[in-house]
Amino acid sequence: MAIPVRPLLLQLLLLTLLLISIHQSHPAIASTTHLPLSKYPHSLSVADFGAIGDGLHYDTVAIQSAIKACPTSHHTQCHVTFPPGTYLTKTLFLKSGVVLDIKENATLLGGTKMEDYPKESREWYVVVAENASDVGITGGGVVDGHGLGFVKRFNMRKNVMVSWNTTGACLGDECRPRLVGFLDCKNVRVWNITLTEPAYWCLHIVRCESTSIHDVSIYGNFNTPNNDGIDIEDSNNTVITRCHIDTGDDAICPKTYTGPLYNLTVTNCWIRTKSSAIKLGSASSFDFKGLIFDNITIVQSHRGLGFQIRDGGNVSDITFSNINISTRYYDPSWWGRAEPIYVTTCPRDSSAKEGSISNVVFINITANSENGVFLSGSRHGLLNNLRFINVNLTYRRWTSYSGGLIDYRPGCQGLVNHSTAGIIMEHIEGLEVENVDMRWSDHQSGRWNNPLDFKSSTINNISLFNFHSSLY
């Protein structure tokens, strides 16, 4: 027998069904949940905005127009695509949600004139994003900084570069544009792209949060100074993986100018450089914490793993693991003396503070080098709790550059005459060496003085377990 339904109850039932129907057909009205970026991004071609791509005429206006035309929705990513061609440009400014999609056989080429760049030197980039989110570069093509156009005089020791300091726009001899910069950005992604021939730093990450850099190839002229590969400055939660970096100056370089740097992970990279393959500093006014470097190959570089702490910041909780290193001497005008591992902290000048370095682990490291390991704290900036576990060091000379020098640069004591040793240590509180094998080239043994070099008055709490040193 059917049960009668009262009119009021029926109305409530119909109203409930109506609200469910509205929610299903218009979910955005009923929910405040933020949606992810679309899997199929909006796409605009620079050719549709008048870009020529002949490498002779500037395409800046067309490219910037395409960037401006991208929708501003927080839920849609816009790819600005570059078909095959060479696109000469002045500085390009990205906005939130925009990814430059530079296709294979397409090159974005930076200009070499000062008028190609903004008045403020801090914006001297070929491509720059500032205060943006969900931005990036990809596509399989090339961003070219036209770096050889900034060489004033070619020199096999070190090129002499153009500097725009005579204009007063900046000071010093490093007044040249960088290649790509992300300043105060969130959710940055750079992948599947080649960055080549920067006039100055190549990829610059400044005060950014959540950055992913993967499958990127970086090439800089091997004789050009200051053409760093990737500079990570005051940025947190950064991941770099599967990158190939072949350049003159530092390859991967975390720095702290205005704030701390936390949670940097670098894996599966190949590096060659005339300076440091990996270097913390030398800008180091704030702390570095929680950095991991794993499965990295360093080839024919002037220095392998380096710390240049000069401005009072403290460094802690750093791990280097599964790394193969080959270091050699280059001209002494480049910082470095072929050290496979170089850990130093000392004041840049008389006004600088002394930072400390603590809780650093080197595990599963293999090195073939022309010089030994250098571990140097300072009186008020000690090295604390360093651990070397499963490390194989092979020392032999194969270039004709002179040895017998310690390199404290920048600042501190500069270059100092000192006999060569397997590991030089000073101002350390806590050093653990476990399963370390040190081998010396037989026919060059006269150039090496001793395996371990230290003054007991500056070293405390050293533990050696299964340490071997021998000729081969």
Image: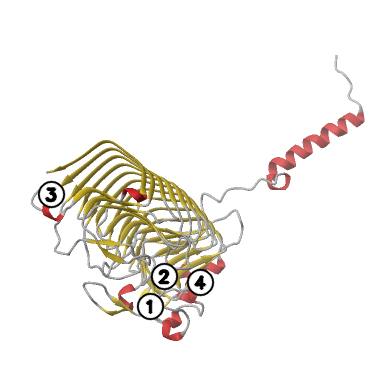
Name the residue nearer the viewer: 148 or 7.
148
Q: Residue furthest top?
A: 1
Q: Quadrant of the N terminus?
A: top right
List x then y, in percent, for residue 390: 28, 38
Front disc: 1 or 2? 1
Q: Which amino acid, by three-letter code, is at mark 4?
A: Gln
Residue, x 32% and y 67% (percent of image)? 414
Question: CA separation, marks 3 and 4?
Answer: 58 Å
N-terminal-most mark, 4 or 1: 4
Front disc: 3 or 2? 3
Residue 139: in sight, yes or no?
no
List x then y, in percent, for residue 464: 29, 38
Question: CA separation, marks 4 and 1?
Answer: 31 Å
Residue behind mark 2: 178
Residue behind mark 1: 173
Say how many tags the image has.
4
Local SS, label 1: loop
List x then y, in percent, for residue 298: 27, 52
Residue, x 24% and y 67% (percent of image)? 332
Occupied quadrant, residue 338 = bottom left
Give the vertical position of 445 relative to 98 (above or below): above
Front disc: 4 or 2? 2
Local SS, label 3: loop
Whether tag 3 and tag 2 are in contact, CB under 8 A, the answer is no
* Residue 429, numbered label: none
Residue behind mark 4: 64
Question: CA separation, marks 3 and 1?
Answer: 41 Å
Front disc: 3 or 4? 3
Front disc: 4 or 1? 1
Residue behind mark 3: 441
Give the vertical position of 453 relative to 157 (above or below): above
- Count residues near mark 1 (Cα–Cα under 10 Å), then give few for <14, some for 14-19, many for 20+: few
